[in-house]
């Protein structure tokens, strides 16, 4: 649907959205109990987690400016559901109650505007 490099920029933007202080996601290293003293069982037998790649803030802010100023409500919702919330592309049209053609058009338009923003700064 959209170019791989634009998809990578949108994924970087989504990672940037989830990084930072609360209200972002908190690591699950403590119990939700009042004491907060619970320690999870050891992971010694599991495979180590892949290190997270830190998002490129400058490039993410370019995407965020496009998100705030150039995208309509449908395009915003589509890219949020796809990239930030991580919904599978096949389920988004039904969730939003739109046709697959409308979903694809919104993704293509959002990708086109993100691509144009990067071409302008290059």
Image: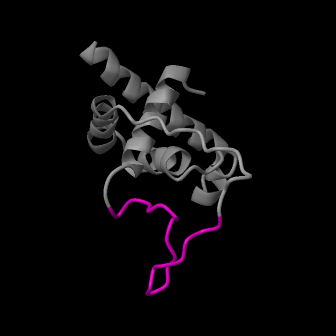
Give the residue at x 57% y 49%: 86
Between 36 and 108, the one nearer to me in the picture: 36
Between 54 and 3, the one nearer to me in the picture: 54
- Location of the C terminus by quadrant is top left
Q: Is residue 120 above or below residue 75?
A: above
Q: Is residue 64 above or below residue 37?
A: above
- Residue 39: image location, x then y, percent: 55, 71
Q: Main secondary structure of the magenta part?
A: loop
The single residue placed furthest to the top in the displayed view is 122
Q: Does 93 sit left or right of 59 as displayed?
A: right
- Location of the N terminus by quadrant is top right
Span colored in magenta: 22-41
- Residue 67, picture quadrant: top left
Between 86 and 103, the one nearer to me in the picture: 86
The single residue placed furthest to the right in the displayed view is 45
Give the residue at x 55% y 46%: 82
Q: Is residue 44 above or below residue 110?
A: below
Give the residue at x 60% y 52%: 98
Give the residue at x 29% y 31%: 62
Q: Is residue 51 visible?
A: yes
- Residue 68: image location, x then y, percent: 28, 44
Q: Is residue 3 visible?
A: no
Queried whether the magenta region covers residue 40, the answer comes back as yes
């Amino acid at each position: 649907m959209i170019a791989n490099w634009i998809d990578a920029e949108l994924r970087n933007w989504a990672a940037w959205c989830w990084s930072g202080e609360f209200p972002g996601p908190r690591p699950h290293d403590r119990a939700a109990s009042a004491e907060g003293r619970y320690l999870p069982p050891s992971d010694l037998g599991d495979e180590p987690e892949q290190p997270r790649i830190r998002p490129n803030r400058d490039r993410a802010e370019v995407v965020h400016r496009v998100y705030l100023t150039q995208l309509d409500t449908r395009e915003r919702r589509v890219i949020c559901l796809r990239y930030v919330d991580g919904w599978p592309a096949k389920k988004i049209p039904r969730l939003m109650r739109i046709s697959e053609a409308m979903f694809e058009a919104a993704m293509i338009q959002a990708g086109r505007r993100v691509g144009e923003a990067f071409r302008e700064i290059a």
